[in-house]
Amino acid sequence: MFWIFGGAYTEGAGSSPHTDGEALARQGAVVVTFNYRLGPFGFFSHPELTNESGHNASGNQGLMDAIAALRWVQTNIAAFGGDPRNVLKLYSADSDEEATRASCMRRFWRG
């Protein structure tokens, strides 16, 4: 299970106490959490940054962090007992918008 935490893109962490990966692991799930950049460090958009971007976009650093984490998980999850073809992506209620954007940007995380 690949967990993306919520927090309105301004707060939160993959290690939040309300994310009980231990209980899921006891049932045989491999649970992966991660952190991504928040606030202006993760979602600041500016024309100069857009011009420098290889993707002709800016303001998606936090989303790109999530995509990089997902790529890493799909490459390495077998070493932790997981199946790279069966990675379940779960999002908190606050991060459902990110889930939608991530789905639209599949070309980035598929390589």
Image (cartoon, grey):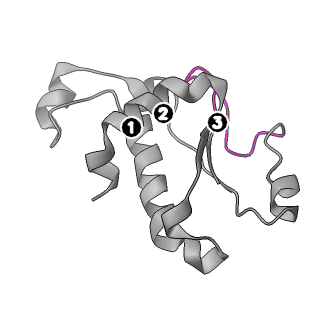
* Residue 22 within the segment the image draws in magenta: no
Whether residue 51 is situated above or below residue 81 in the rendered picture: above
Q: Is residue 73 visible?
A: yes
Q: Residue at x 58, y 22 (%)?
A: 10
Whether residues under marks 2 and 1 lie with C-beta atoms below 8 angstroms apart, the answer is yes
- Kindly identify the amino acid type of the residue bearing the numbered disc 2: Ala
- Kindly identify the amino acid type of the residue bearing the numbered disc 3: Phe
- Kindly identify the amino acid type of the residue bearing the numbered disc 1: Ser
At mark 1, the secondary structure is helix
Q: Residue at x 65, y 75 (%)?
A: 80
CA neighbours of label 1 inside 10 A, class few (<14), some (14 to 19), many (20+):
few
Position of residue 111 measured from the top left corner of the image (x, y, whole percent): 27, 59
At mark 2, the secondary structure is helix
Position of residue 88 measured from the top left corner of the image (x, y, whole percent): 58, 52
At mark 3, the secondary structure is loop
Q: CA distance from mark 2 to mark 1?
A: 6 Å
Whether residues under marks 1 and 3 lie with C-beta atoms below 8 angstroms apart, the answer is no
Describe residue 108's horizontal placement relative to residue 37 as left or right. Answer: left
Position of residue 105 measured from the top left corner of the image (x, y, whole percent): 31, 39
Q: CA distance from mark 2 to mark 3?
A: 11 Å
The residue indicated by pointer 2 is 99
Viewer-nearest residue: 70 or 46: 70
The residue indicated by pointer 1 is 103
The residue indicated by pointer 3 is 5
